[in-house]
Image: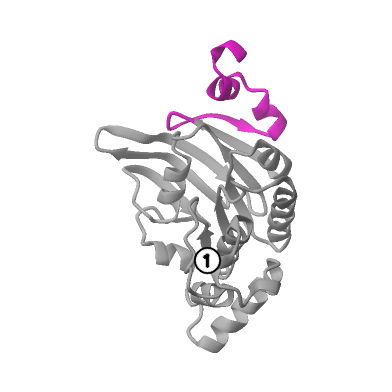
Amino acid sequence: MAYFKVEKLVKYFGGLAAVNGVSFEVQKGEIFGIIGPNGCGKTTTFNMISGVFPPTSGKVIYQGKEIQGMKSHKICHLGVGRTFQVVKPLGRMSVLDNVTAAAFSRVNTIREAREVAEKTIDFCGLAPVADVLAKALPIAGRKRLEITRAMATRPDLLLLDETAAGLNPTELLEAIELIRKIRGNGTTVIIIEHIMHLIMTLSDRIHAINFGQSVAEGTPKEVAANPQVIEAYLGKDYA
């Protein structure tokens, strides 16, 4: 039995099928990449997995349990955490307070939440800026804070939505190391990313989507050589 899978996910917005039959499986301990052009349905798929909105049809199965249509907080309590493509930290609060707020999703007291927050901040490399206001962080810091807040919910499965966008080469390498560290800590990762160096470097397997449909899956090398993937990114002349 797969650790996590989606089966024929469909999401209509009015008459538009943003996702139309996406299916894939993820094994425990994997880093599983999802790629595709802008607007192809990647984030919509994450939104259905994490309970932002229900699928029109299809199934989301996590550790043998169907979770499609459940509320986001209940999915989080089951062990599914996520980041968002557009980071929106609590700007007037410190890094520590931002992560403490996230930790309350799984604990009940301020003491427990602080303990979780401090450990998570240290794990994710934000201890030097723990007392800095979130709005004062540069983009790399805000991206890392987004991951740190997600990790404070203690996920077994972490969904990362374009956490490397806007990073310079040094920051990109640091992001790669953090994601590897998260997987090394026992967390399964599904990652959406446009930066091919990151997705090809990190992923055990990659699933490609175009026009809301699954078009290819395999190792990074296999997917990079797939004619449908090449056509989706570069056009028919290159496929």
What residue is at 55 percent from the left and 61 percent from the top? 146
Q: Residue furthest left?
A: 14
Name the residue beneath numbered marker 1. Answer: 135
Look at the image and say whether residue 155 sits in the magenta stretch.
no
Q: Position of residue 60 (x, y in %)?
A: 44, 49
Secondary element under disc 1, as helix, strand or loop, is: helix
What residue is at 64 percent from the left and 78 percent from the top? 118
Range shown magenta? 210-239
Q: Is residue 168 above or below residue 224?
A: below
Q: Position of residue 186 (x, y in %)?
A: 68, 62
Q: Indicate left or right for 184 with 214 as reference.
A: right
Q: Position of residue 123 (x, y in %)?
A: 70, 69
Q: Position of residue 78 (x, y in %)?
A: 49, 65
Q: Indicate left or right for 13 with 82 as reference.
A: left
Q: Is residue 158 above or below residue 9?
A: below
Mark 1 residue type: Lys
